[in-house]
Image (tube, grey):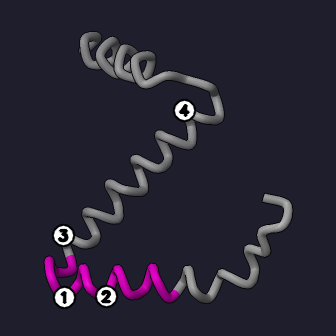
Amino acid sequence: MENFDFHRWKPLIGLSVGLVVAVLFLTIGFWKTVLLVLLSSVGYAIGFYMRKHDLSLAVVFETIVSVLKRR
């Protein structure tokens, strides 16, 4: 990734994200789009945390199940 010039691609990435969000607004509506973005962000955050702490999916599910069983 050393040779990849990310700064050249920022406008194209922004355009692509804006286009996808606009199409989602028009096809499924505002609130469904907001929910989709929110759930995607939560999924990204969980994946980022898993990669940062070198966790497997099984460990994450076991942790969630153990927390839910405590209640």
Q: Tell me the crowding category of disc 4: few under 14, some 14 to 19, or many 20 or more residues within 10 angstroms, Cα based.
A: some
Q: Amino acid at mark 4?
A: Met
The span from disc 1 to disc 2 (Cα, nearest Å) is: 6 Å
Question: Mark 2 falls on what kind of element?
Answer: helix
* Magenta-tinted stretch: 15-30
Between disc 3 and disc 1, whose residue precedes?
1
Q: Which residue is mark 1?
A: 26
Q: Is residue 31 left or right of residue 8?
A: left
The span from disc 4 to disc 1 (Cα, nearest Å) is: 34 Å
Q: Which residue is mark 4?
A: 50
Q: Quadrant of the C terminus?
A: top left
Q: Which residue is mark 3?
A: 32
Between disc 4 and disc 1, whose residue precedes?
1
Question: Mark 4 falls on what kind of element?
Answer: helix
Q: Which residue is mark 2?
A: 22
Q: Amino acid at mark 2?
A: Ala
Question: Mark 1 falls on what kind of element?
Answer: helix
Q: Tell me the crowding category of disc 1: few under 14, some 14 to 19, or many 20 or more residues within 10 angstroms, Cα based.
A: few
Question: Mark 3 falls on what kind of element?
Answer: helix
| Nearer the camera: disc 3 or disc 1 | 1
Residue 50 lies in the magenta-colored region: no
Between disc 2 and disc 4, whose residue precedes?
2
Label the magenta part by its dominant secondary structure.
helix
